[in-house]
Image: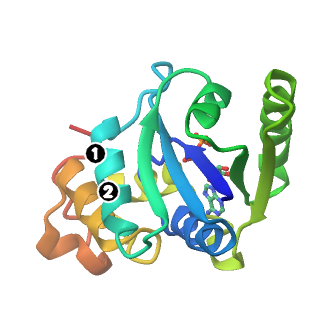
């Protein structure tokens, strides 16, 4: 059984992540989407919220599981009986970091392979940070994230759903920052 772990912050999950998850679910027998609990990062959403959003948007994919992990990724991968890590690549700018991470994983455990999936062209610009930035100013994020995530972002940034969903907010932003 080929089990792959797709690790990340997913703060929050975007359509770019979801595209990688769907495609990976067709390649591997089981895909474990693993939300990192890294204390060093200051996420907008708690681990539980990020896991819940991911579970909701992957509920139609029976071979996809969503979990969270602490500590070293290689230990988590081993503990789940997997030996494949899946990562997405958007642009050359991703390469440096991913290269470093892949070599570190190899150094720590050479039985684990990291496989990369190239982004689909329509999502090549998309990142969780961009989505949060656009949402924080009340911009339209409809094609960037699943609907459940769009609603959570509007809640978090206290944007009126009536005025903002679909980008018809005309700047009626009640709060410009996370609460
Ligand atoms: P991290 O904090 O580990 O970078 P992210 O949640 O930002 O976690 O991303 C997880 C993985 O998904 C990374 O491999 C990242 O390159 C990939 N990814 C993020 N956005 C996209 C996208 N739009 N298309 C393809 N892959 C993506």
Say few, some or many: other residues with alpha carbon within 10 Å of mark 1 (under 14 / 14 to 19 / 20 or more). Answer: some
Question: Residue 111 placed where, x, y %?
Answer: 83, 36
Question: Pointer 1: what residue?
Answer: 49
Above-or-below relation of 154 to 101: below
Looking at the picture, how far across and down is residue 30, in whole percent? 57, 61
Residue 13 visible somewhere in the drawing: no
Residue 37 quadrant: top left
Q: Secondary structure at mark 2?
A: helix
Q: Nearer the viewer, residue 174 or 118?
A: 118
Mark 2 neighbour class, 10 Å CA radius: few under 14, some 14 to 19, many 20 or more? many
Q: Are marks 2 and 1 in contact (CB under 8 Å)?
A: yes
Residue drawn 54% across the image and 20% down it = 71
CA–CA distance between discs 2 and 1?
A: 6 Å
Name the secondary structure under disc 1: helix
- Front-most of 33 and 157? 33
Q: Is residue 43 left or right of residue 100?
A: left
Please state which of residues 129 and 89 is positioned toward the viewer in this rendering: 89
Quarter of the image with the C terminus is top left
Q: Is residue 112 left or right of residue 53?
A: right
Relative to residue 136, is residue 148 depicted above or below? Answer: below
Labelled disc at residue 53:
2
Q: Position of residue 17 (x, y in %)?
A: 55, 61
Q: Nearer the viewer, residue 156 or 78?
A: 78
Which residue corresponds to the image point at 28% horizontal and 45% vertical from the top-left? 49
**For the residue with label 2, is its CB less than 8 Å from the closest atom of ligand 1?**
no
**Which residue appears at 72% of the width and 48% of the height?**
84
């Amino acid at each position: 059984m080929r089990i792959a772990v797709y690790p990340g912050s997913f703060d929050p999950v975007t359509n770019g992540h979801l595209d990688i998850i769907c495609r990976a679910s067709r390649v591997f027998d089981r895909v474990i989407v693993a939300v990192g609990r890294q204390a060093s990062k200051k996420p907008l959403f708690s681990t539980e919220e990020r896991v819940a959003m991911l579970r909701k948007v992957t509920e139609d994919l029976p071979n996809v599981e969503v979990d969270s992990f602490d500590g070293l990724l290689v230990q988590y991968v081993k503990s789940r009986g997997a030996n494949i890590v899946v990562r997405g690549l958007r642009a050359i700018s991703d390469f440096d970091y991913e290269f470093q991470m892949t070599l570190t994983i190899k150094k720590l455990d050479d039985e684990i392979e990291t496989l990369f999936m190239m982004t689909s062209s329509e999502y090549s610009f998309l990142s969780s940070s961009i989505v949060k930035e656009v949402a924080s100013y009340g911009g339209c994020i409809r094609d960037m994230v699943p609907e459940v995530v769009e609603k959570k972002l509007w809640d978090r940034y206290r944007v009126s759903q009536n005025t903002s969903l679909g980008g018809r907010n005309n700047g009626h932003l009640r709060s410009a920052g996370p609460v």
